[in-house]
């Protein structure tokens, strides 16, 4: 296990407390990252139905997985064997039969079918079919959206979690160095990403990497005016810029980083935009301290952009930690105006300055930890426009 049983039990108690505050007696968590947080379960099995069930009075959660994945649950979780509940292959692709039919049976057999049940209504992989099955199968239950309850329990990290994120950051830095080396004119984007991904998996001498929850993002040329573009077989061109956004991953914990590389002498507008971007990013970082809010950070950031008359509509940061495809964000904190979430020590977030101007753009980001007296950058890599 990556954490002690004591830490898993402390997480469970934190979740139960939030359940009590929200009037939830039974929580069904379908979010892959939340399943990992609550039990340690970690496998590429989230493409089919699975969940963790937390009863407010039970000592352990129940991990509900496909029979084929039971071995992984026995290996990866801290749970007693009786709390790993599996469903058979007879439920796989046998519509309208569905694994949640069996989940309904379990809830009924435990006489939990009249409880107030919290569901993660906006979780990845919690499909409309899952909801329909459980809603129709438990007509006497009272359903409510748990409103990312477990996600918020994850908001403040333990020292062990911080250690894993710092390890991930070392891998991120190594892979970003690789990116700056391999991105050159007439090199195919896919070839460069092959080397970047290799670096992310190779990690460091002492820390091995694993797959990140988001692939290498690589908008290049005109693509820098857009977000979340990935590599193609097209070649890098002299005179164009490329944005690289990547993250190392250790025990599912991430430390993302974005930088911009320019091939050849840059136009002055790119130099100026990058300077303003870094100034705004630094202003936001300086406002990151316990007691300040996400709004305080955002106001400091946008004050700089307003000075340079730069318009930016998208948020400029979000909470990070455990991640599974398709996202490394925690879906809690937003670094955006009017988000009054208070920052506390060991809150971690990705502050990302994406600047887009019609048919070009620049970008830089940092993974940040709130400390007792201020903040700490998890990655150590120059923010400047990297000119080759």
Image (cartoon, rainbow, N blue to C red):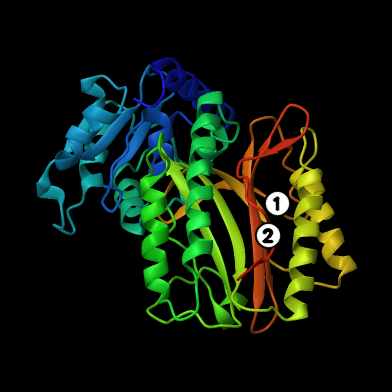
Q: Is residue 123 visible?
A: yes
Contact between marks 1 and 2 (CB within 8 A): the answer is: yes
The N terminus - image quarter: top left
Which label sits on residue 335? Answer: 1
**Residue 90 x/y as whole percent:** 9, 48
**Residue 112 x/y as whole percent:** 34, 29
Of residues 50 and 235, the one nearer the viewer is 235
Q: Residue at x 38, y 19 (%)?
A: 58
Q: CA distance from mark 1 to mark 2?
A: 6 Å
| Residues packed near mark 1 inside 10 Å, few (<14), some (14 to 19) or many (20 plus) | many
The C terminus - image quarter: bottom right
Q: Residue at x 49, y 72 (%)?
A: 229
Q: Residue at x 24, y 32 (%)?
A: 73
Up/down of 231 relative to 135, above or below: below
Residue carrying label 2: 315
At mark 1, the secondary structure is: loop
**Residue 314 x/y as whole percent:** 67, 65
Work out which residue is located at the far right of the displayed protein and give it.
307
Q: Is residue 285 left or right of residue 44?
A: right
**Residue 132 x/y as whole percent:** 33, 54
Up/down of 20 relative to 276, above or below: above
């Amino acid at each position: 296990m990556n954490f002690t049983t004591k830490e898993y039990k402390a997480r469970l108690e934190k979740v139960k407390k939030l359940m009590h505050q929200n009037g939830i007696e039974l929580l069904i968590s379908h979010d892959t990252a939340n399943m990992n947080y609550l039990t340690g379960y970690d496998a590429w099995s989230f493409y089919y139905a699975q969940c963790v069930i937390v009863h407010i009075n039970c000592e352990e959660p129940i991990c509900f997985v496909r029979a084929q994945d039971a071995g992984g649950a026995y290996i990866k979780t801290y749970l007693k064997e009786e709390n790993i509940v599996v469903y058979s292959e007879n439920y796989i692709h046998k519509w309208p039969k569905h694994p949640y039919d069996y989940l309904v049976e379990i809830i009924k057999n435990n006489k939990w079918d009249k409880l107030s049940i919290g569901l993660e209504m906006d979780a990845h992989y919690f499909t409309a079919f899952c909801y329909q099955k459980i809603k129709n199968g438990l007509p006497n239950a009272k359903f409510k959206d748990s409103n990312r309850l477990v996600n918020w329990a994850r908001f403040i990290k333990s020292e062990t979690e911080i250690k894993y994120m710092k390890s991930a950051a070392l891998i991120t830095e190594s892979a970003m160095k690789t990116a700056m080396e391999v991105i050159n004119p007439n090199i195919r984007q896919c070839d460069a990403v092959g080397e970047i991904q290799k670096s992310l998996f190779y990690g460091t001498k002492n820390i091995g990497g694993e797959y990140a929850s988001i692939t290498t993002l690589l908008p290049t040329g005109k693509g820098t005016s857009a977000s979340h573009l990935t590599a193609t077989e097209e070649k890098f061109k002299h005179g164009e810029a490329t944005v690289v956004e990547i993250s190392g991953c250790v025990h599912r914990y991430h430390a993302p980083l974005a930088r911009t590389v320019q091939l050849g002498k840059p136009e002055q507008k790119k130099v100026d935009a990058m300077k303003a971007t870094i100034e705004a990013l630094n202003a936001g970082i300086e406002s990151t301290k316990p007691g300040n809010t996400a709004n305080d950070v955002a106001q400091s950031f946008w004050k700089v952009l307003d000075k340079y008359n730069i318009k930016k509509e998208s948020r400029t940061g979000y909470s990070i930690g455990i991640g599974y495809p398709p996202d490394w964000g925690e879906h809690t904190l937003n670094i955006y105006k009017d988000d009054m979430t208070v920052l506390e020590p060991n809150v971690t977030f990705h502050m990302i300055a994406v600047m887009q101007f019609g048919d070009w753009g620049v970008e830089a980001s940092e993974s940040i930890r709130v400390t007792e007296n201020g903040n700490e950058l998890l990655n150590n890599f120059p923010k400047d426009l990297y000119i080759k």
